[in-house]
Image: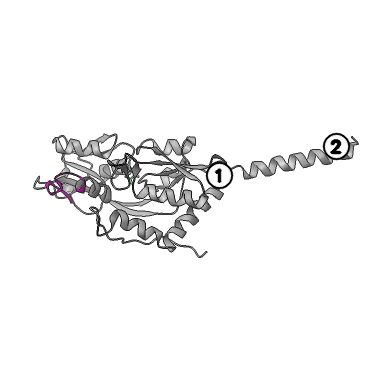
Amino acid sequence: MRKATFLTALALVLAVCVASMAHAGKLDDIKQRGKLICGVKDAVVPFGYVDEKTNQIVGMDIDVCKYIADKLGVGLELKPVTSATRIPMVAQGSIDIAAATMTHKYSRDDVIDFSITYFMDGQKLLVKKGGGIKSVADLAGKKVGTAKGSTSEKNIKTAQPQCKVLSFEGYPQAFLALKQGKVKAVTTDSTILLGLRNSDPNPEQWEIVGDYISAEPYGLGLVENDSDFRDFVNKSLAEMWVSGDYQKTYNKWFGPDTKYYLPLQWQMEIWPF
Ligand code: GLU
């Protein structure tokens, strides 16, 4: 081979390598694999929980994942996560998306990226009815249960520095502690508290009290620095909202015919298509 021909061939090989490196991202990985892997909660009604009849994980977060998987034209695999494991699992790549009641906070941006806001909530307290706790002020010197790795853990310490926070693996365990009298309240996002209360056999014994002590805008957790994938996820969420599919899905879990009725009171930020 003449030197000039050899150099041209080498340049071509290098160009192909660089081009394929530039395209090797999550979107290609997922399409090649044929399925989107989502990390979801499996004990947070009605965002992600095991349906007793089918033994499948279902919920609002699962339907959001399904919408994105359908847009990608791939199947969906669900992996259970907790508040403490979801960020490391996205960072390590064992899940493509964390759709797990996760608040987008700037401090969480250090390790992973987030989608636009796809759900809006705020933190409150779940207490025993008539138990004397009406607000965070009443929790001075009292024990409060929540989940390890949540924003709720930090927010309650700020809102009531004189309470003792007990952090559990998940919210059902914190609720059990409330039932056993080991804590005076469970604290987290109000819709999660609504799910705990209204899926209990005796909901009338429990009440959600106090003002919101935080704003909790939920984002989907995504791998750091993959803007093609992030753009795709954001556009899918926007399409879900604009097409009315989001509202349909929301009503399936939080509409007037459900046990968890909560009017939709916020709007997704939509950029023009
Ligand atoms: N949304 C809050 C958070 O991301 C509380 C709910 C949860 O633990 O998933 O930490």
- Which amino acid type corresponds to the residue marked 2 in the rendered image? Phe
Q: Locate residue 225, reporting x and y percent.
A: 54, 45
Q: Quadrant of residue 200?
A: top left
Lower sequence index among marks 1 and 2: 2
Q: Does the magenta stretch include residue 113?
A: no
Which of labels 1 and 2 is toward the front?
1
- Which amino acid type corresponds to the residue marked 1 in the rendered image? Lys
Residue at the spot of label 2: 6
Q: What residue appears at the point 27 percent right and 34 percent down from the top-left corner?
A: 168
Quadrant position of ligand 1: top left
Residue closer to the observer: 168 or 157 = 168
Q: Is mark 2 within 8 Å of ligand 1?
A: no
Residue at the spot of label 1: 31
Residue closer to the observer: 238 or 153 = 238
Query: Residue placed farthest to the front in the image?
Result: 53
Q: In which quarter of the image is residue 266?
A: bottom left
Q: Locate residue 207, reporting x and y percent.
A: 16, 49
The quarter in which the N terminus is drawn is: top right
Check the image and report above or below for 241 versus 25.
below
Q: Locate residue 21, reporting x and y percent.
A: 65, 41
Check the image and report above or below for 56 versus 255.
above
Q: Quadrant of residue 97?
A: top left
Residue closer to the observer: 262 or 53 = 53
Q: What residue appears at the point 43 percent right and 58 percent down from the top-left corner?
A: 240
Identify the coloring: one colour
| Disc 1 from disc 2: Cα separation | 35 Å
Query: Residue placed farthest to the right in the image?
Result: 2
Dot 2 falls on a residue whose secondary structure is helix
Q: Locate residue 107, reporting x and y percent.
A: 41, 44
Q: In this view, does 70 lie to the left or right of 121?
A: right
Dot 1 falls on a residue whose secondary structure is helix
- Magenta region: 198-208
